[in-house]
Image (cartoon, helix red, strand yellow):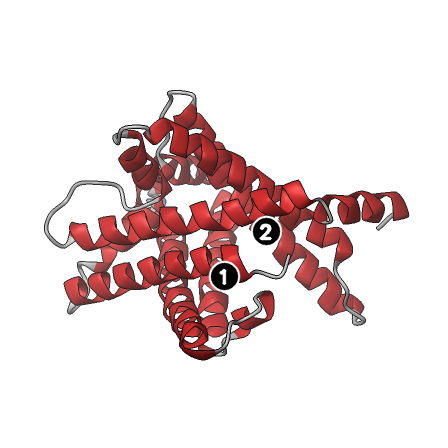
Amino acid sequence: MTNSAKSAARTATNSRALEILARTGFAVLGLLHILIGAIAIGLVGGSGESADQSGALSELASKPGGIVVIWVVAIGLFALTLWQIAQVFLLQEPDPKKKWGRRVSELGKGIAYGAVGATALTFALGGSSSSSDSSQSLSAKLLASPGGVILLVIVGLVVAGIGVAFVVQGVLKKFEKHLVIPAGTTGKVVRGLGIGGYVAKGIALFVVGVLFVVAAVTADPEKASGLDGALKALIDLPFGKVILVAVGIGLIAYGLFCAARARWAKL
């Protein structure tokens, strides 16, 4: 990385205004996951809402003053995206292979935050967006291109791998390195939320990845229905409703953990 890029990244991360906005980003990310978790639990009762970012934003938009909140969501997530990408340039790791692996991971997080921010901006400007439609559209384009089946399988395996990584981070409590964990009962609660939240989100992402692979194998892009489809697919499993409620509660826990991270994150 060039010195100028590192200098710009360091300046960005040292900005008090950007730090406040990035913490706001974690908070609004938490809010979205709490809403997604609540919608997921509602699916058990036959709710037709979309259990993904689009569904959460639609829920916000339907409330008085919701558009103002969505603008805050968009701004916070874009700030979090900028802060996350800055970490790519400032990463300290003596092992070159691990360093590039971590850089790819940090960049991936930044892209993910930016994608949700773009969805929020669409809603803030009066439009609408469907994560399921976006996933199916991407799958259809890949399947229509040369070597598209292989590419879609790779996309599915990568997403499933990210899901496994979330579960591992939760079980091994690797998320702790990103926070200054408070002492006492509060710290125990934050750890508990992190463990449950990371595992639940990992399960959801793993199923999303599996659906991409199924879409590739069956040549049916509609199978790749994103997070909403993944959560709805859980209902068809043995004890599916119980699993879905557990995952929904876990996503709410992840949302509360993100809110805690907004307070105690190492920025």
In the displayed orientation, state which residue is furthest to the right.
3
| Residue holding disc 1 | 162
Q: How many marks?
A: 2
How far across and how far down the image is residue 57, in percent? 34, 36
| Residue holding disc 2 | 108
Residue 81 appears anywhere in the view: yes
How far across and how far down the image is residue 29, in percent? 44, 48
Q: Secondary structure at mark 1?
A: helix
> Which numbered disc covers residue 99?
none
Three-letter code, disc 2: Gly
20 or 86: which is nearer to us? 20
At horizontal 33% and vertical 31% (from top left) the residue drawn is 66
Asked if residue 63 lies left or right of residue 100, the reply is: left
How far across and how far down the image is residue 114, in percent? 54, 40
Q: Are marks 1 and 2 in contact (CB under 8 Å)?
A: yes
- The relative height of residue 49 versus residue 92 in the rendered view (above or below) is above
Which quarter shows the C terminus?
bottom right
How far across and how far down the image is residue 9, in percent? 76, 46
- The relative height of residue 21 versus residue 178 in the rendered view (above or below) is above
Three-letter code, disc 1: Ile
At horizontal 74% and vertical 60% (from top left) the residue drawn is 91
- N-term mark: 1 or 2: 2
55 or 144: which is nearer to us? 55
